[in-house]
Image: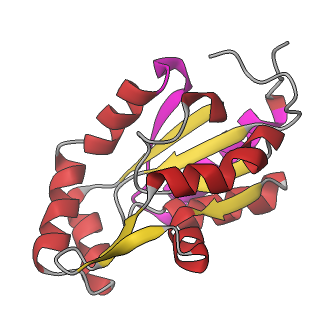
Amino acid sequence: MVQDSKRSRPNILVTGTPGTGKTTTSTALAESTQLRHINIGELVREKNLHDGWDDELECHVINEDLVCDELEDIMEQGGNIVDYHGCDFFPERWFDRVVVLQTENSVLYDRLTKRGYTGAKLTNNIECEIFQVLLEEAKESYPEDIVLALKSDTIEDITRNIAILTDWVRNWQPRS
């Protein structure tokens, strides 16, 4: 991918199954790098960028076009960490690094049940992690050299991931 020469700071997508630590990682990374953290779930709720509620999965049905329209200008500026459990609808040109957080299934199960996930919502998310759906989605949607899978089972993993990504941000150079 040719990076946008107008950007002086990189854009990072942090993705993964719900419960893998996206928001925790993105928040800490934003603090350590001074990049802007954009939580897509919160943005969708705050700006009504959805097409209603899915009763079975107990979540909003996001309107991907509205989300992309909302983010276009800010993404062109650079300096963003986008936090969302999907990645295939964002334009490839937006991101300089795509991070896929992965969590061991029993750890993920415990995290999701503590959040109150049950039934189809719990099963779908565990299966998504087992079959590495989001890693495959990232590899199909972005150049493989910008996709990075990171283990996110423990606080130590998250701390290490933040250090790795902070170093990457500090060393990032825009291409002309």
Q: Is residue 160 visible?
A: no
In front of the other: 99 or 59: 59
70 relative to 74 in the view: left or right: left
44 relative to 73 in the view: left or right: left
Q: Residue at x 70, y 61 (%)?
A: 37
Measured as percent of width and height from the top left, residue 78 is found at 79, 41
Looking at the picture, does residue 162 appear above or below residue 57?
A: above
Q: Is residue 161 magenta?
A: yes
Q: Residue at x 28, y 66 (%)?
A: 107
The chosen color scheme is: secondary structure
Q: How many marks?
A: 0
Q: Is residue 162 magenta?
A: yes
Q: Is residue 127 visible?
A: yes
The image quarter containing residue 28 is bottom right
Looking at the picture, does residue 3 appear above or below residue 86?
A: above
Measured as percent of width and height from the top left, residue 5 is found at 85, 22
Measured as percent of width and height from the top left, residue 19 is found at 37, 67
The image quarter containing residue 172 is top right
| Quarter of the N terminus within the rendering | top right
In front of the other: 134 or 62: 62
Q: Which residues are the magenta region?
A: 142-170
Looking at the picture, does residue 158 appear above or below residue 109?
A: above
146 relative to 19 in the view: left or right: right
What's the magenta bit mostly, secondary-structure-wise? helix
Q: Residue at x 53, y 19 (%)?
A: 145
| Quarter of the C terminus within the rendering | top right
Measured as percent of width and height from the top left, residue 86 is found at 40, 50
